[in-house]
Amino acid sequence: MFLKINNMGKIIGIDLGTTNSCVSVMEGNEPVVIANDEGKRTTPSVIGFLKNGERKVGDPAKRQAITNPINTIMSIKRFMGRRFDEVAEEISQSSYKVAKGDNNTPRVDIDGRLYTPQEISAMVLQKMKKTAEDFLGQEVTEAVITVPAYFNDSQRQATKEAGEIAGLHVKRIINEPTAAALAYGLDKKHTDTKIVVFDLGGGTFDVSILELGDGVFEVKSTNGDTHLGGDDFDKAIMDWLADEFKAEENVDLRKDPMSWQRLKEASEKAKIELSSATETEINLPYITAIDNVPKHLVKKLTRAKFEQLVDSLVERTLEPCRKALKDAGMSPNELDEVILVGGSTRIPKIQEVVEKFFGKKPNKSVNPDEVVAIGAAIQGGVLSGDVKDVLLLDVTPLSLGIETLGGVFTKLIESNTTIPTKKSEVFSTAAENQPSVEINILQGERPMAKDNKTLGRFILDGIPPAPRGVPQIEVVFDIDANGIIHVSALDKGTGKRQNIRIEAGSGLSKDEIEKMKNDAKMNEEADRKVKEEIEKVNMADSQIFNTEKQLKEFGDRIPADKKQAISDALAKLKSAHQARDISGIDNGLEELNKAWHAASEDLNKAMNDQQQGQAQHADPNSSSAGDEPIQDAEIIDEK
């Protein structure tokens, strides 16, 4: 399928977004954003499962969402790496079914088949992978994928697994604001600059403070909210519309998936329009019917009303900004630039609040939809050696530690520690002759263990009987450059060691990931076949129409035996077309083509005769070769 080349393959950069995704690659010294096969530089992170078994990704999936809301998956990123009991709010906002799967993980239910969030995300990544392959003309196997800076270990693992399922070796997981800073600062790497990246995307919010200088991009602090994004702004409009309609018509549109999906699309459109206009009209004819009487929803929404609806959401962006500044030990006036990232930063109220908080106008020199993918491509270039003299120093967003006596969270690595990093601490037993210890690995900022995220648990057993506090157990935390955690515990007395790479945090084992990887390959092949079948059926449909038309126009000029052969082949093709029998369609098309080929000489003569007749009818006095030549006329300009 692809030309085999000797040089090392490209490492592509993918921004796997809640609402939209984007792919970029380094071409020479420049990052290039790659347009998909629809000609768009960003692709909606939407998957549609059709009744005929076909699967749509991106814009085609989004276009059919209103008529197929239950089988159209959007904003799957909000479920990545999370437990079923953590996503009740997300489930309530989804038009598709979400069920509880193995290991307390959320699964998307499509006609009884349960898909993990990683599998759904992998379908988007496969589209990004193919987009890059079509552009480069070679197979792509390696990628840098971005995640929100405030993603925890489970969410990072889940993203890495999605890449593996899509057939990609994920060379690095990189934080979205850090990627944006790379893209912004690549041509300024020799200038000392302090910047803040304010990243408000479709489903998550991050703020990171960085220092740039001498090719070093050092993250000083990061903070955020993984439950805040453009989806929430859409939801505010949706709720307002639903409440207004209920007050007027006593019908709750939330109960009808199709109406709710129409509200979602209209709300997103209204939000976008209000970034440039001060008022918009939301017009949804036939939104529902009451006693067989159609009802329409027509509402005007002003920018002022929209800002009132989302006021609490806008306010929620400020506390992470305060914390990030405090952790970086900086004040707003020490910052040189404020960079806006993510489509939601186009909202005028967001820009106004950001300017007021940081005391300077935001820098709008970067494209908020593409800058993260560009940064990921640059990091891919750094890893492959194509980009020189760039060093990226990122941080871990949340503190890491273990549960100790009394349910206390004891931190081993503080938040905003530069990664990669390694830290160890010695603990002991809490009871006499304790034969084993359970290590509960936690991530978060709360003082009590129960209030933080459990990433995984493991047991170190075989501890010899000893008084309480005597055994020495060394716990080592190791965070790699992806922000993914490895933990080990060593009984110093016996030399017994227990290692854990936090894999269960995402709810998937290596075997499950491998199975999903194979399923994804098979599904890709199945999707290709379904597409080919649809194209064959459409080809047959077109051929049937053309044949019937030509028989009607020229049938009386084709010899009877040849006309009968065409009619017989046409009947076979019609029968196969009606039954959607692909091999029958192939045979029917072949027979029909042969029959037409046999009659082609007679048909061409008939068509030529008709064209000549039409020409003579159009100009009965047309000159023949023997007529007098046409005289040139001189045009005199009368003034």
Image: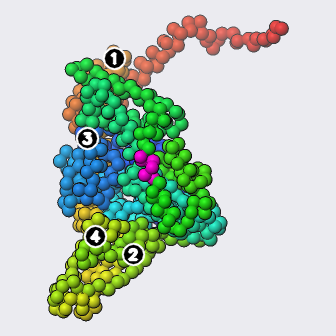
> Which residue type carries mark 1?
Lys
> Which of the pair 257/50 is nearer the observer?
257
Answer with left or right where residue 552 lies relative to residue 178.
Answer: left
Q: Residues within 10 Å of mark 1 (few under 14, many from 20)?
A: few
Residue 560 occupies quadrant: top left
The magenta span reads 312-317
Disc 2 marks which residue? 413
Measured Cα–Cα span from mark 3 to mark 1: 45 Å
How many numbered callouts?
Answer: 4
Q: Which residue is mark 1?
A: 552
Q: CA distance from mark 3 to mark 2?
A: 43 Å
| 568 shown above or below 533 | above
Q: Quadrant of the C terminus?
A: top right
Is residue 315 located in the magenta-colored stretch of the structure? yes
x then y, percent, for residue 299 = 40, 27
Left/right placement of residue 212 relative to residue 597 reads right
Image-based side of 412 in relation to 6, left or right:
left
Q: Position of residue 483 (x, y in %)?
A: 40, 69
Mark 2 is on which residue type?
Answer: Ile
Q: Marks 4 and 2: which is nearer the front?
A: 4
SS label for mark 2 = strand
Residue type at mark 4 is: Ala
Does the magenta-highlighted stretch encompass residue 455?
Answer: no
For the point 37% across and 16% down, the residue is: 553
Which of marks 1 and 3 precedes in the sequence? 3
Comparing marks 3 and 2, which lies closer to the viewer?
A: 2
Q: Earlier in the sequence, mark 4 or mark 3?
A: 3
